[in-house]
Amino acid sequence: MIRKNLTIQYDILADWLINAYCNYACEYCPQVRTKSHRKKSAGRTDIDAMADFFDSTNLTWLIHMSGGEPFLHPEFVSLCRLLTKNHYISVNSNISLKALDAFMRSMDPARVAFIHASLHYYERIKRQSLSGFLHAMHETKAAGFPAYVTQVFYPPLVEEFGEIFSYFHRNGIIVHPKIFRGFYRGRLYPQEYSERDRRVFAEFYDRASSMDELPATHINPDHDIKSLQGFLSFKGSSCLAGNRYVRIDYEGNIYRCSMAGSAIGNIFQKKFARFAGAEICPYRICPCSYFGLEFADGQPKTVKIGPLVKRLIKLKQDMFAQIHRI
């Protein structure tokens, strides 16, 4: 069965961490962002080999490109041009870089499912670039690209979210609240949001979802309301991860999903052991719940992480790195 997204038809969705370097330094983000790591984490540049892998599978791919900041990849726009000859893409970006202009000039909007623009309000304030974000969003939409905006519902920002929402609404942009997944002052979110935090989130979820016409996407920010009490679990459910969906890291390794420890292929080795169909999910939590809600059967359960496991996660936060990335 071919899944549909607007007028896009595709066989398999890839969530591709194309690099792990970012020009922003958001304190809630676990990705590499220091200049000393830039070369190592900027992503591989043999873009012909990348595109050739996808073409060689004889499948039509929808490739969700994330990072880090994907527009920092040195060949990002050229790679997008190659990929969209036969496939479709979507992009998660802070839309702060000039490469966005080159992308819009050279890309066919019909080959782009959406651009997910991450606001990162504190970083924009620090750089005095709120107007730049507004300009980039309006230009993106004027060029015909489906786009939407989210802001991570980070605990220190909760009190300000109403003002942020109102400011952007006055300027023609709707900001969708995005669940914060991770630690703040030793507390693990989303399970440790206060009841007031949850009421504020629900209020702006309702307002945003009623005011904004989102593209019919494979990553729906309005699904975050389902994670407001804690992490989602699809354990025991039949899931098409590995068949209709895969995760790819910036070394080209292909995984069933973000929780899987062993690869089922590699772009640069032209290997991909695609699953024949759905398999039972064995994992207690789904850090990519957007994809779990898309590809797993049944209703997920909400699970709470206990004190012992929480301490272990705190010691090894890199194990939790994927939960911020979409």
Image (tube, rainbow, N blue to C red):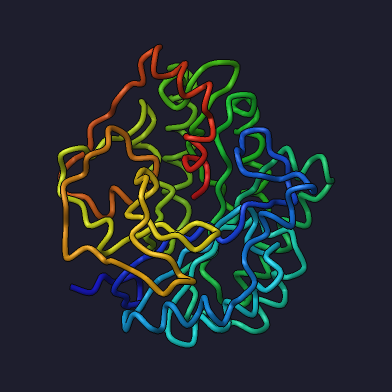
- In the displayed structure, 202 sits above or below 256; it is above
What x and y, as percent, mark residue 244? Answer: 27, 64
Q: Residue, x 58% and y 25% (percent of image)?
A: 155
Residue 83 seen from this side? yes
Image quadrant occupied by the N terminus: bottom left
Q: Nearer the viewer, residue 238 or 104?
A: 238
Q: Is residue 189 left or right of residue 128?
A: left
Q: Is residue 221 left or right of residue 100?
A: left
What x and y, as percent, mark residue 156? Answer: 64, 24
Q: Is residue 96 left or right of residue 28?
A: right
Q: Nearer the viewer, residue 285 or 261?
A: 261
Q: Residue, x 28% and y 66% (percent of image)?
A: 273
Q: Residue, x 37% and y 64% (percent of image)?
A: 265
The residue sitting at the top extreme is: 307
The residue sitting at the bottom extreme is: 85
The total of numbered circles placed on residues is 0
Q: Residue, x 56% and y 39% (percent of image)?
A: 152
Q: To which quarter of the image does residue 113 belong?
A: bottom left
Q: Is residue 163 left or right of residue 224?
A: right
- In the displayed structure, 128 sits above or below 94; it is above
Q: Nearer the viewer, residue 273 or 208?
A: 273
- In the displayed structure, 277 sits above or below 25; it is below
What x and y, as percent, mark residue 176? Answer: 51, 45
